[in-house]
């Protein structure tokens, strides 16, 4: 049974570990919403299964699935993947699952952020979201870890940590419309207490067209302490060019929590993707859900990858930037195999591979999370 503690992770000596540390496993959720995923989510389910199988080659994978889709998911996934029936509103486990923390001896706990579908009644992407807001506690219970209910409306995709005291976030995902009624300074205190960090680097915005309000995991990612991957459009006419150059200028003059300058590796941004007429026609209309129309910009990025124990599961799109992105990731992650997956179907739903996954750290003291 999960106990929600009255303290904070930093009070108790816990921190969010970097994603490039060893994992015990990974959680995902099975897509099925016809108002988000086209053609009854069948194309998306195929890609989700590919991602799950790729991750399962080096760590334990659990896929949560609704009662309606349980038999279908079980049939489409191999026996090495654990499939558990659980209720949720949509399949973005990075944002609705717990953000895990660990301490110096290797104990794992979880953070349960307040979730309101990226904006609540003001700009949320669907309603209701009550099942999503309860999901983190359910996963912590399944994994038998205690945790914390954070007093912050926030999501896992909105944070980026280096494991040495530094976090990077974007302003609108913390104190923007439909988020937290507090100042940046007040939010920074709360973030440091729950992330276990000492320094927050703020970027003024995320990429254009990101439905979440501008999650950091679409724009940049840590490959190692002090080494940052940044999505970079070579074309200055790109809708994302101003955002990328603004982020580069800020990050290039910043230091991390240890006082060191950041090394920034530019990863080419794919050409702009737009929803086709055929794709839009395959999405059900539902009142209260975010509309997806033909011609709408779909943010495409190679940054939104999953760093598995022995590999990196890399989003690609069958476009001109795919090969160079693979080469850059091979250089940035020596010792890990780069596994490209065509992920347009995930992008059409509003995110990508990082958004649909949530890693569980390896534990040194909880044997059920300790099989490496």
Image: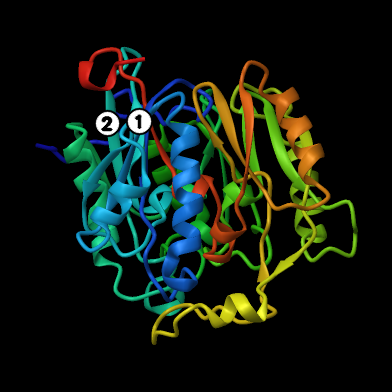
State the residue in front, 366 or 158.
366
State the residue in front, 10 or 282.
282
| Secondary element type, mark 2 | strand
The quarter of the picture where residue 228 lies is top right
Q: Residues within 10 Å of mark 2 (few under 14, many from 20)?
A: many
Residue 12: x %, y % from top left = 27, 26
Q: Residues within 10 Å of mark 1 (few under 14, many from 20)?
A: many
Discs 2, 1 touching: Cβ within 8 Å: yes
| Quarter of the rendering occupied by the N terminus | top left
Q: In the rendered image, which residue does mark 2 sit on?
A: 109
| Quarter of the rendering occupied by the C terminus | top left
148 on left or right of 173: left
Name the residue: 43% across, 76% down: 35
The quarter of the picture where residue 140 lies is top left
Q: In the rendered image, which residue does mark 1 sit on?
A: 101
Q: Relative to residue 372, is residue 194 depicted above or below?
A: below
Residue 248: x %, y % from top left = 78, 45
Residue 53: numbered disc = none
State the residue in front, 129 or 294.
294
| Secondary element type, mark 1 | strand
Res. 19 in view = yes
Name the residue: 80% across, 59% down: 271
296 on left or right of 360: right
């Amino acid at each position: 049974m999960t106990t929600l503690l009255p303290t904070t992770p930093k009070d108790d000596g816990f921190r969010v570990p970097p994603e490039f540390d060893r994992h015990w496993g990974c959680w995902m959720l099975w897509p099925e919403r016809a108002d988000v995923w086209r053609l009854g989510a069948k194309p998306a389910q195929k890609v989700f299964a590919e991602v799950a199988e790729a991750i399962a080659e080096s760590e334990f994978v659990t896929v949560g699935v609704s009662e309606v889709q349980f038999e279908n998911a079980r049939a489409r996934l191999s026996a090495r993947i654990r499939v558990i029936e659980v209720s949720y509103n949509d399949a973005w486990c990075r944002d609705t699952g717990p953000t895990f923390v660990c301490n110096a001896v290797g104990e794992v706990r979880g953070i349960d952020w307040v979730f309101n579908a990226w904006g609540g009644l003001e700009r949320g992407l669907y309603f209701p979201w009550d099942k999503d807001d309860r999901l983190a506690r359910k996963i912590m219970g399944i994994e038998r870890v205690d945790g914390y209910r954070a007093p912050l409306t926030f999501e896992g995709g909105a944070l980026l940590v280096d494991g040495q005291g530094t976090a990077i976030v974007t302003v609108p995902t913390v104190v923007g419309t439909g988020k937290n009624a507090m100042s940046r300074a007040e939010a920074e205190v709360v973030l440091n207490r729950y992330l276990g960090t000492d320094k927050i680097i703020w970027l003024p915005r995320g990429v254009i067209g990101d439905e979440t309000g501008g999650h950091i995991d679409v724009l940049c990612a840590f490959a190692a302490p002090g080494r940052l991957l940044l999505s970079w459009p070579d074309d200055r006419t790109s809708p994302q060019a101003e955002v990328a150059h603004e982020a580069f200028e800020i990050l290039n003059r910043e230091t991390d929590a240890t006082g060191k300058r950041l090394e920034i590796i530019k990863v080419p941004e794919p050409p702009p993707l737009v929803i086709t007429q055929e794709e839009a026609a395959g999405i059900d209309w539902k009142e209260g859900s975010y509309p997806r129309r033909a011609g709408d910009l779909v943010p495409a990025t190679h940054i939104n990858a999953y760093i598995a124990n022995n590999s990196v599961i890399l989003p690609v799109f069958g476009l001109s930037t795919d090969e160079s992105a693979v080469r850059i990731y091979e250089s940035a992650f020596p010792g890990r195999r780069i596994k490209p997956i065509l992920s347009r179907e995930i992008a059409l739903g509003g995110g990508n591979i990082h958004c649909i996954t949530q890693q569980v750290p390896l534990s040194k003291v909880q044997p059920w999370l300790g099989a490496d």
